[in-house]
Image (cartoon, grey):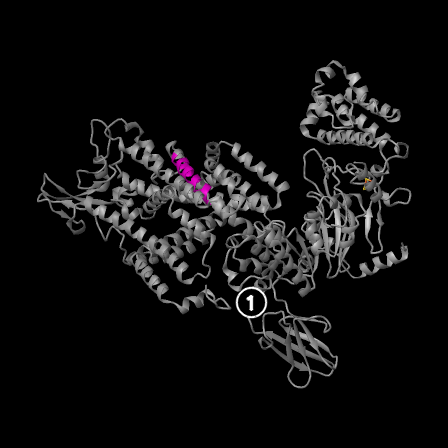
Amino acid sequence: MSEELLTEAQQTAAAEALVEVNGLKTYYDTGGLLGSQPVKAVDGVDFSIGRGETLGLVGESGCGKTTLGRTLVQLETATDGEVLFDGRDVTTLSGDELKKWRRDAQIVFQDPESSLNSRMTVGEIIREPLDVHGWPNFSVAVADPQGRSASLSGDGTLTRADEQADITVSIGGGSPTVDVRDTLPMDDSDVDASITERESSVAVSVSVTTAKSRLRRARVRELLETVGLREEHYYRYPHQFSGGQRQRVGIARALALEPEFVVLDEPVSALDVSVQAKVLNLLDDLQDRFGLTYLFIAHDLSVVRHICDRVAVMYLGHIMEIGETEELFRNPKNPYTYSLLSAIPDTDPSATRERVTLRGTPPSPRDPPSGCPFSTRCPVKIRPAEFEDVDEDIWEGIELLREILREREQRDRGLRERAKQLLGLETGFDDIHDVVEEVFTSEPTAGENQPADDGSEEMDDEQRLAAALSEVPPGVRTHVETAVELIEEDKEPQAHRLLTEEFESVCGKEPPEHHPVSETGRTSYCHRHRPEYDEPEPVFEHLLDQD
Amino acid sequence: MSETTDVLPFTQRLRSNPRPALLWVGVLLVLLALEAGAIASVAVTIVSGLAGAVASGAAAVVGGPVVPSIGGAIDAALTSAGQVANGLPTLLSRDAIPNQGYQTPDGAWHGTFLGLEPKHAWLLRVVVVYAYMFGLLWWCWRGYRLYVRHYRFADWTPRDDVVDRLRTHRWGQFGLVVVLLFVGMALFAPAISPMTAEQNLYNAAQHDIEYYDADSESVEKMSAFDANLASASRGAGSVNVNPWQYDDFGRFHPFGTMTNPGQDLFTFMAYGARVSLAIGLIAIGVSIVMAAGLSMLTAYYKGVIDLAVVFVSDSIQSLPGILLLLLVSATFQNHWFGQIYNGGLLLALTFGVVYWPGLWRAVRGPALQVAEQEWVDAAKSYGQRSATTMRKHMLPYTVSYLLIYGSMSLGGVIIGVSGLSFLGLGINPPIPEWGRAIATGQDYVTTPAWHISLLPGLLIVIVVTGFNALGDGIRDAMDPESEGEDADAGATAAGGGA
Ligand code: SF4
C-alpha cells in the first residue's frame, strides 16, 4: 500500500470538499443540579464531504449520528472543533451571517408527522423559508462585451458575470437583452432593464414587474411539482396527506432556498417500505438535477448501500470507519463495522460471513470508556501480551465480569444509589459468588445447575468460588480472587480498578488512530491496524471458527 | 378543486362571485342599523371612558390646571357626540317598548307599550333583545359558512373538525347558551332591566314616578326613592315584593325587590352582570396574555428562564389571594388608579396577577411539547426569527388550552369578586355587585324575602357552570386524536384543575 498515493487521494478529496469537519465535538449539558457529566453525543469526528457526493452516516440509535447531522446545519451548537463549509467555519457564524448561510444548508427531518406544522397549509409551509429570506433576492449579472464596470439600481444585487445569476443583462447594440434563469418562475419579459452607457462605466436599472408574493406562490407550486406533488395541494393541510407525501413536502421546504447541502436525517425510516424506494429515488433525482450534496443519516444499512457514495460508521460519538460504500460493505476492516454488517442477512451471497453477536449494550455517552469507544464490547479486543494464551471462554468471562462492574459503577451515579451509599445502606452485590460462577462456567450450565441445586447449596461460598475458578489459570485467578474479596468488603470501585489494571490492554487505555486501510482513502479507528497486532478480520475468522 | 394555475386572491374570488357576500352584508347592515343608536352610544361611552381615564391619569401625573381645561373640551365634544348617538333610532331600548306606567281603575294601562300590562311589555322587550342577539350571532355564523362554501380556497382545514365536534357537543352548547345569556344580560342591561339604573340604583331621589292613587282617585307623582322604600322587601311581618309581583305603585319586579332602600333586584342583577363580566374578562385577559407570553418564552428557551418563572409563579400561588387583594386595595385606596371603575380595574388586575400562574402551569406542559416538535427545529433551520417561530409555530397549539382554562377560571373570578363583595370589600356601593346582593339578603333567607340571597346565588352557580361547560366543550372539540398531536394529550387530564 503506497502511503504517498493515499495522501494524494485524500488531498484531492479535500480540495473538492464542500463540507469539512475537523475535531467536531457536541456535548449536551443536561443541566443536572449535581454537576453531572455532559452527554458526549459527538466526541471528536473528522471527515469531509465532496461536492455532489452522498455520505452515509450509520450507527445504532444513540450513537450521536443525528446530533452530528444537526450540528452540521447549526441546529446544535458545537462544543469544539470546526465545520468548514466552502472553506468557511460556520460554527462561529451568528446573526445575519448565520441566517444568510442557512440558505445553503438545509435538513430533512425523520418524522413527517412532526416536521410539518399541522395548522398551516402545505403552501404556507413550503413558502415560509422564502418569506423569511425575502426571496427572491435576484442576483443580477451584467454582460458587457466592452468589460466596463457596471453599477446597478432597482431590484436585485450585482454579481460577477461568471457566476450563475438570476438575471443576466446583456449589453450590446441598442436596448439591453434580459435573460432570466430557467429555474425562476418568471419570463424574460417580466423584467424591465434600462441602461445608461458612459465612457468607462455602465449604469443598469432593473425592475421586476411581477409581485414578490406572486413569484413566491409560483415558486411553491413549482417545488410541489419538483417533489412529485400537484399544484392544487397548495391549499391542503398536512393531515390530508400520507406519510410519503408529507415527507415530499418536507423535502420541498428544504429545497425552497436552493441549498447546496442537505442533511437527510433518516428520511425514509418512518415510511412504509413500499414508499421508501420512491422517496429515495426522488432524492436521487433531485441530487442529479440540482447538484446537491447529501449527508444521509440512516439506520437501515441496505438503504445506505443503495444510495451512498461513501459511508461513515459511527459508534458512541466517534467515526469508527469511513470509506467508499461498496468496498466497506464487502470488506469491512473495523471490528465494529464487521459486527454491524454481520447482522444484516446475506448482503452478499458469496460471502460466508457469520453473525457476530455483541455482548451488553453500548456504554452511556455520559461516561464513555477511555481508549477505544468500542473496547467494552469488542469481540476482537486486543489482549495484554501476558494473557495471549488464556482460554477464550475464560477471557470472555473476565471481560464480562469487568463489564458488569462497569455497568454497576455507572448505575451508582444515580442519585438514589448515592444517597443510599451516603447513608451506609446496602448497595452491594446480592451475591458476588453467583455472578462469578455464572461468568466463569464455560458452558451454559444454568440448566444443569438447577437439578443439582440441593447439592450446591451445601457448598459454602468459598467452595463454589473455587469450583467456578477451577479451570482458570493461576495468573488470572489470583486477581479475580482479590477482586472478589474487595467486592465482599464493599469496595467495588477498587475491585474494578484492580481488574482494569491487570487485564486492560492498549484498547482500553489509548484512543486509537484513524488508520488508512485501503487505497481509496478508507480509514478505520482501531489499534489492530498497527503493525504489531493482528488485523481484525483473521481474528474474527478464528473466533467464529471456534464456535 | 379548480384547475387554475394561479390561485386568485380572496378579493378576486369575491369579485367573481359577489352575490352571496353582498346579500349577507346587506342583511347584516339592516340588523346593525336597528341598533345604530346603541352602537354609536357605546362607542362614545368607550371613548369618553378612555378619555376620562387618561385625563385623570394625566391630572395625577401633571397635577396642573391645564389638564382640566383640555379635559373639559374633550368632555364637551363627547357629550355632544353622545347626544347625537342617543338621537339615533334604537330597537332595543326602553323607549321603543316602555314597560312603566299606571293602571286606572278600569283596568287599562297608561304609558306602557300598546297599553300592555308592564309584565308583558317587559317580557316582550326581553324576548326581542335576546332574539336580536341570537339572530345577529346566527347571521355571523351563516356568514362564516358562506365564506367556507363560496370563497375559501382550502376545501378542508383543521378548524372544520373542531367546529364539527362542537356542533354535536350538547354540554358545550349548553354552556355556550348560558354564557351568551349572561353576556346578553350584561351587554343589554339598560334594555332588559325593568327600571333604569339611574332611577333604581344611583339617583332614585331625583326621579319621579307616576302612579294611580286609589284614595285620591287620581294619578299622583312621587319620588322614586320613596316608592322604592315603600316597596322594599323586609322579611317577616312586613311588606315583601316577591319575584314576579307588582308593587303598590304598579311596577313589575321579575326578581322581586331588595331590602332597604328597595331596589329592583333584576335591575341590580343586570347591571351587576356588567361588573362581573367586565372584571372577569379583564382579569382573565391579563392572565391569559401573561401566561401565553411566559409559556412561549419558557418553552422555547427552557433552562434558567423556566426556573425563574416557576419560582415567581410558585411564590404568587403561595400567597393567600384574599390577603393580596386586601393589601392592594389598602395601598391604592386614595390613589387615582384605585378609583377607576370604582376600584374595579384594580380588582381585575389583581385577579389577573393572582390567576396567571395557574394558567401558565396549565399550558406549560403543552407548550414544552410543541417546542419539541420538529417543525420548530425546521423553522430554526431556515433562520426564522424566534419571536415569529413562537407566534406561528407554537402559540396556536396552546391557544386552545388558554381558552379552556380561561373559560373555567372566569367562573372562578366571578365567584371571587362576589365573595369579596360579600365580605364588604371590592366594588363599593352603589355599584351593583352580585355578591353584595347575597350579603344583604342573607339575614332574610328564612323569611318571605328569601329571594334576595337565593336568586343571585343561583345565578352565580348557573353562570359558573355555564363557563365550565363551555370550557369542556372547547376541550373536547380540540380532540387530541384527530389533531394528530401528542401535545394535546395532556389537556384532558389536566383540564379539571383550573
Ligand atoms: S481498538 Fe481494540 S477494542 Fe477498539 S475496535 Fe480495535 S480491537 Fe476492538
Quadrant of residue A535 in the image?
top right
Quadrant of residue A454 in the image?
top right
Query: Is A429 inside the magenta-drawn segment?
Result: no
Which is nearer the eye, B322 or B201? B322
Which residue type carries mark 1? Ala
Position in image of residue B3 (x %, y %): 48, 67
Q: Is residue A58 above or below residue B444?
A: below
- Chain on which label 1 sits: A
The answer to whether residue B339 is visible is no
The answer to whether residue A199 is visible is yes
Q: Is residue A460 above or below residue A317?
A: above
The answer to whether residue A63 is left or right of residue B199 is right
SS under mark 1: helix
Position in image of residue A334 (x %, y %): 80, 46
Q: Is residue A541 above or below residue B423?
A: below
Which is nearer the eye, B362 or A250? A250
Position in image of residue B83 (x %, y %): 31, 57
Start and end of the magenta stretch?
B403-418
Ligand 1 falls in which quarter? top right
Magenta-colored segment: predominant secondary structure: helix
Q: Which residue is mark 1?
A: A218
Q: Is mark 1 within 8 Å of ligand 1?
A: no
